[in-house]
Every structure is written in C-alpha cells, then in structure tokens.
Amino acid sequence: MNNYPQSTKKSTLISGIVSLLLILFAGTFLLPKLQDIGIPYETVLYISRFFIWFCLAILFLFSFYIEKQPFLLYKEQVYPLSYYFKSVVKTMLILIAALFFVSLLIKAIGYPVESEKMNQIMKIFKNNIPLIAFTCVTAGITEELLFRGYLTPRLEILLKNKYGAIVLSSILFGLLHYSYGTLIQMIGPFTIGLVFALHYNKYQNIKIVIICHFLWDFMVLLIKNGQLH
C-alpha cells in the first residue's frame, strides 16, 4: 500500500477506528429515539445527516493532530475527464448487477425484502426534494470518506491484507444499516461497500466512488418515491 504511515503507532490507528465505529453505531441506535421526545421524524433524519458530517470533521482533526498524517492514505490519482465518465458508468453497471444478484438470492431463500422501517422513511422522503438531495450528498461524501477513504486503508495496515480490509470495512458498513429493518438492508450496503472499496483500492480516486454513491442513492430514492414518472 502507498504511504504506509511508519510514524503512526498501531494503537493510535486502532483508537481512531474504534472511536469512529462506536460513535457511528451509537448515533444509529440513539438518534431514532429522539422521536420518543416528540421530535418529528423528518427533523430526526436531518439531525442524523448533520451528525455524520460532525463525525467526519472530528476524524479529519484526529488524523491531522493525533495520527499526524493525511486523512486519505492513498495518494489521490488524477485521470482524464473522459475516464471519470467511463468509470462511473462501469461502476454503476457493476453495482446494479451485483445488487440484482443479491436480491435474487434473498428472494430465493424466502427472506422478506420489504422493510416496514424503510417504508416509513420513504413516506418522509415523498416529494421532499431538499431532504432527498441533502441525504444523497451527505451519504455520497461522508460515507465514502469515512469507510473507503479513512477506514479501509487503516484496516489494511493493521491486517496486512488489503482484501481482508475491504471485506471487513464492507461488513461494518452493512452492519451500520441494521436499523432499517431487514437482512437485505444490511446485505445491500455490504455489497455497495464491497464494490466501492474494491474500486477505490485499485484506482485510488475517492471522487469516483463519491459520485457513484450519490448517483445510486439519488436514483433509488427518486424511483421509490415515483418521481421519475
């Protein structure tokens, strides 16, 4: 791996990774409970998005002041503009094929695909373009920077195995979506994380996976809300 941080102790890397995961999972568990004190669910969704931006900001400071190294350990590669377009299209097609295959497997074993929790969330998103846009921008930027940009390379250092790091970071990404209700709501993100992590590891350009993540979420939310008709 490029830019192996020789000066950074493994204990420091571990503390950053563990702190990130604890904060994210705590937020995933606790933020929905704000509804119990009367805060509307739409407001809770906005708060949860601001929360993950806050996590990203804290992690940037941690990498700079505590780890004393760049947030992105992979040196960002620069490609021609035409490559970005081709790479986004190719990655999106791979993602669609992978998720289609996963959904067929889930249906084949008879596990429910529909999630009551997701249906509830979709009602909040219905005709709410500002929330849809903010959610997709937040997910595309923050989740890719946190999981593919920060977490995966550091796991690679600790595990000394890039594929082990890719799989583990994808599992953690999937588990972070446990509150959405069904198995596919975790396997789907796991698959997404796997595709994006493999791409980022190979091509080392975070902008491409950010764009793909945004486009995927935006497309899915528009389709689910019937806004493409």
Image (cartoon, helix red, strand yellow):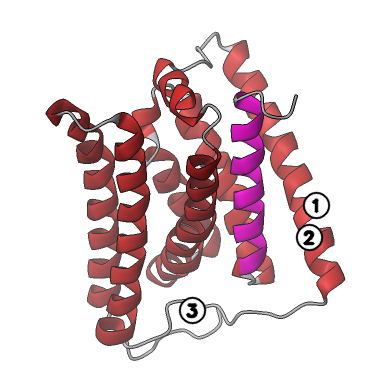
Earlier along the polypeptide chain: callout 2 or callout 3? 3
Question: Residue tagged by mark 1?
Answer: 90
* Position in image of residue 106 (x %, y %): 57, 19
Query: Which region of the structure is painted magenta?
Result: 207-224
| Left or right position of 222 against 67 | right
- Secondary structure under tag 2 reads helix
Q: Which residue is drawn at 69% across and 69% down?
A: 203
Instruction: Give the Cα distance between marks 2 and 3.
Output: 21 Å
Q: Is 220 drawn above or below residue 150 in the view shown?
A: above
Whether residue 171 appears in this view of the structure is yes
Residue sitting at the far left? 37
Amino acid type assigned to the residue bearing label 2 in the image: Ser
Q: Residue 73 carries which label?
A: 3
Amino acid type assigned to the residue bearing label 1 in the image: Lys
Q: Which residue is drawn at 38% across and 89% down?
A: 6
Question: Residue tagged by mark 2?
Answer: 87
The crowding category of the residue bearing disc 1, from other C-alpha atoms within 10 Å (few below 14, some 14 to 19, many at least 20), is few
Amino acid type assigned to the residue bearing label 3 in the image: Leu
User: Residue 46 versus residue 149: which sits nearer the camera?
Assistant: 46
The crowding category of the residue bearing disc 3, from other C-alpha atoms within 10 Å (few below 14, some 14 to 19, many at least 20), is some
- Secondary structure under tag 1 reads helix
Q: Contact (CB < 8 A) between labels 1 and 2?
A: yes
